[in-house]
Image (cartoon, rainbow, N blue to C red):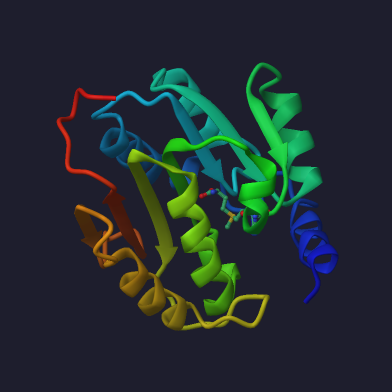
Amino acid sequence: MDRRGYAEVFDSFQAKEDPWGNPSSRRSMFKALLSWVATRRYKRILEVGCSGGYFTDMLVKADLGRVWALDVSTVAVERARSRYPSHTFVVGDVRDIKELFDFSFDLILCMDVLYYLTTADLDELFEAFMDRLTPKGRLLAVLHLDDSTSLTGTNFTTINEHCKSLFGDPRFKKVCMWPDTGWGKAVYFVEMQEIGDDEV
Ligand SMILES: C[S@@+](CC[C@H](N)C(=O)[O-])C[C@H]1O[C@@H](n2cnc3c(N)ncnc32)[C@H](O)[C@@H]1O
């Protein structure tokens, strides 16, 4: 699937006001994830796949640092901007992260987005994340636990296994993996350096 077709698929999902069941069905997961990342402050935070901006708003209100929220769907970003006009939303494909941002982030969040990519995409993206994470950066990824195949033809279990090996990379000095959180999701939370919770 080419980039344009890929973005159009996600635009079409946005025909529904809340395509991913936000916020009520996901609120407890969002709250838990927020509490995990809120152990520190950050200079710059990137949320990948922000959709309508619900989690973005929680992040901004938690005042953990400056937030950029990215989504490949123009429709999603327009809706997010109209809901939360003071937050920073960017239209773009995370695979272009190095072209989209010429600076690094202390925290990158990917909630329910990586499994749309192929394993080859993920290998490249992972290196781009390494490039766009500060030396003390953190990366949190949430993946759906399911044995189905995503719309882009990727099998979720394959992606999950692939991510597990990528997040086990020795360049990460602290690796936390929750293979089954009870929400039907696996969560990976890794850090470039093991540092105190109150350090930025
Ligand atoms: C399943 S939704 C998850 C939304 C939100 N993160 C949540 O957890 O409720 C996936 C979102 O990621 C976006 N997305 C998918 N592939 C992307 C990509 N390559 N780059 C940026 N955003 C992407 C979709 O448009 C969609 O809004």
**Res 85 → quadrant:** top right
Give the residue drawn at x 49%, y 45%: 132
Residue 135 % position (x, y): 33, 40
* Ligand 1 falls in quadrant: bottom right
Residue 155 % position (x, y): 52, 83
**Res 13 → quadrant:** bottom right
Q: 195 above or below 146? A: above
Q: Quadrant of the C terminus?
A: top left
Q: Quadrant of the N terminus?
A: bottom right
Q: Is residue 28 left or right of residue 178?
A: right
Residue 147 % position (x, y): 45, 83
Can residue 34 be seen in the rendering of this structure?
yes
Q: 154 above or below 78? A: below
Residue 44 % position (x, y): 47, 28
**Res 167 → quadrant:** bottom left
Q: 129 above or below 144? A: above
Q: Is residue 51 left or right of residue 36?
A: right
